[in-house]
Image: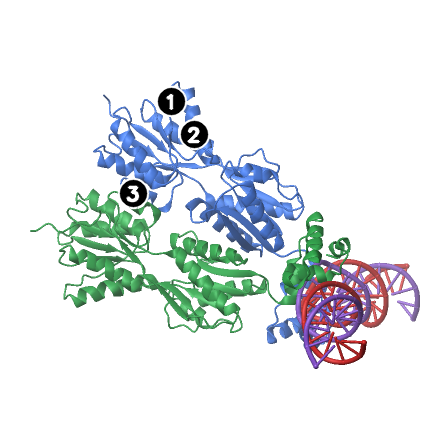
Chain colours: A green, B blue, C purple, D red
Amino acid sequence: MEDVAERAGVSAMTVSRVLNTPEKVRPDTRARVLDAVRELSYRPNSAARSLVTGRSGVLGVVSFDTTLYGPASTLHGIEQAARSEDYLVTIVSVSALSRRSIGEAVDRLRFQSVDGVVIVAPHESAADGLRHLPPDLPVVVVGASDDLPVPVAAVDQVTGAVRATKHLLSLGHRTVWHVSGPQDWIDASGRIAGWRSVLEAEGREIPEPLLGDWSARSGFEHGKRLARDPEVTAVFVANDHMATGVLRALREAGRQVPQDVSVVGFDDVPEAAYLWPPLSTVRQNFAEVGRLSFQLLLDRIDGRAGAPHRMIEPELVVRESTAARLSG
Amino acid sequence: MEDVAERAGVSAMTVSRVLNTPEKVRPDTRARVLDAVRELSYRPNSAARSLVTGRSGVLGVVSFDTTLYGPASTLHGIEQAARSEDYLVTIVSVSALSRRSIGEAVDRLRFQSVDGVVIVAPHESAADGLRHLPPDLPVVVVGASDDLPVPVAAVDQVTGAVRATKHLLSLGHRTVWHVSGPQDWIDASGRIAGWRSVLEAEGREIPEPLLGDWSARSGFEHGKRLARDPEVTAVFVANDHMATGVLRALREAGRQVPQDVSVVGFDDVPEAAYLWPPLSTVRQNFAEVGRLSFQLLLDRIDGRAGAPHRMIEPELVVRESTAARLSG
DNA sequence: TCAAAAGTTGTTATCGCTATCATCGATTTA
DNA sequence: TAAATCGATGATAGCGATAACAACTTTTGA
């Protein structure tokens, strides 16, 4: 920086000003400095800068398994939004959402002086960890229940499940079976709640939900069971991967989709439209969740109040895995 | 830090030593310092540290679309490996792999003084960008051709394609059709090369490869074409998502898999085992690629020579989408 | 027993930048 | 015209850590 200053015939302070508050420097001086910067291909040292400003320009994201479609998309959304504001994103992926693992992840990020943290915590067990966060660190949570002391951005799971269930009932099905995610997942319990509420409101029989683990394998296992029961004509599956397994099980048992059984998934993963048959599902706009959570975090960092909680409405996408119930 | 020193009755320097080279401090002093650290819940300031050491403990990853299964898994592998060595990972995801976008991404990371960068660049167009990297920055590339001036870690695509193709021929198919990825992807061209080499070596007819774009949609489109041609009995599809589309197209056209047509995919995405029928495919160990590339990068950062290029062998996973060709 | 060696701790300077306040000339105002 | 104001730039002092060397203590060995 000294060299740049010398070359431009100014002081180091002026160079700093050109880089941070250009409007406070006379245009011709500014130009000279910028030339010198370019000629020496000078890059300011961020460590020194953040040492004195107390800001690093880096955000942390703590996420459960980033290879899953949802977390990966959310992360991507956060990253895109962050880039437009010149923030960089540091990721810590955790394999469990206990109080301890969240605490450790946040500590590691804090140690690197991130300016704020987004925690993608779709799991019940995270709640404890989320209640014991350092109070001086700006934090936003994605996909958790909204009774937390920090801002939350999430897709409204209940509404999504309600739409899926209503859609199936409107096709004339007597009731709707449900293959759910693990109950300690916020998303799973929200979807169960939405599904159940519709059946209750309409006075339909409420079958016991079949507990899956999000994997295609568990969908397949439950699908085999459902296929055996001729009463089953409509299934709401809590995610598209499990739905993939359910589709396979139904077919192998000789039950046609959608003629014999209608199936709705959740997520709208990219390949959902190309399963056989194309899967009706509930689309979650993860990218939007990412954008929103970043916005919330930025508000926090800059000391603005900002909305405390933000819900995003999911959208029912009807394809060919659902059809009117055959009479009889 | 001053406070900690005072509380422990030592100098700041000793506190620093306790944190960095504990073995150079007498056990009792060390204990006193650690107590003070705990009582004041002191956290060293990484900005100050990296200002003086020139190291940040942060790695950068530049990756093409991190929502794709491959890049996401690789990223995850890098992150896990990095954590075990106390590195944090900062991610920049780019939507194109031009020289410019790679340059910008690397610049943004360098600006944050990362200690090194892994570039996940499975695209031909990245080559130009990879040849013009700043020479003073430790860089490792994942999934690129191996004629680069930087270390490369990759899955051996050619071998994977060879195995898939040989498997199909060994089942008695006359030849093997290929739905490929975009040709400017390294992985796609490698798979084409492997597939073609086997057919050539065996003197089989070499059908024109059908160019897809990795999406289930394009697999579906090509699948419709293949389904119309009764000559087609074996298809090697360049990834599992396209294979999903191919399966659907074949079924819709009334052609049974595997009785009429055998299909092999590539990647082994988690749901591949639960498609209908379970998809035979080639498994790429992305986590291992991530681990390896981190290792390579660490060697670079620490000034060790290290292996220049590392290839990982993919593995053929035979499930139920492939079967012997029916005579006739 | 005492000097040399080894082990421990402290002092000082510095990493590269920006906050703060001082300075100085130019412009406006009375 | 002199005083007040303003805008642009500069000088100085840290931010919080570690490197390098200095100083002091303890061990070691003849």
Q: Which residue position is annotated with label 3?
A: A274
Query: Does residue B20 appear in the picture of this structure?
Result: no
The quadrant holding residue A186 is bottom left
Q: Which residue position is annotated with label 2?
A: B192
Direction left: furthest residue: A328
Mark carried by residue B234: none
Q: Is residue A33 left or right of residue A137?
A: right
For the residue carrying disc 3, how many other residues have a C-alpha within 10 Å: few (<14), some (14-19), or many (20+)?
Answer: many
Q: Is residue B84 or residue B194 the one in the foreground?
A: B194
Q: Residue at x 28, y 64 (%)?
A: A158
- Amino acid type shown at disc 3: Tyr
For the residue carrying disc 1, how many other residues have a C-alpha within 10 Å: few (<14), some (14-19), or many (20+)?
Answer: some
Q: Secondary structure at mark 2?
A: helix
The quadrant holding residue B253 is top left
Q: Is residue B80 left or right of residue B132?
A: left
Look at the numbered discs 1 and 2 and tell me whether their residues touch, using CB distance below 8 Å: no
Parent chain of label 1 = B
For the residue carrying disc 2, how many other residues have a C-alpha within 10 Å: few (<14), some (14-19), or many (20+)?
Answer: many
Q: Is residue B119 or residue A254 the one in the foreground?
A: B119
Q: Is residue A113 left or right of residue B318?
A: right
Q: Secondary structure at mark 3?
A: helix
Q: Secondary structure at mark 1?
A: loop
Q: CA–CA distance between discs 3 and 2?
A: 24 Å
- Amino acid type shown at disc 1: Ile
Parent chain of label 2 = B
Q: Position of residue A285 (x, y in %)?
A: 36, 56
Look at the numbered discs 1 and 3 and tell me whether their residues touch, using CB distance below 8 Å: no
Q: CA–CA distance between discs 1 and 2?
A: 11 Å
- Amino acid type shown at disc 2: Ile
Q: Position of residue B217 (x, y in %)?
A: 32, 40
Q: Which residue position is annotated with label 1?
A: B206
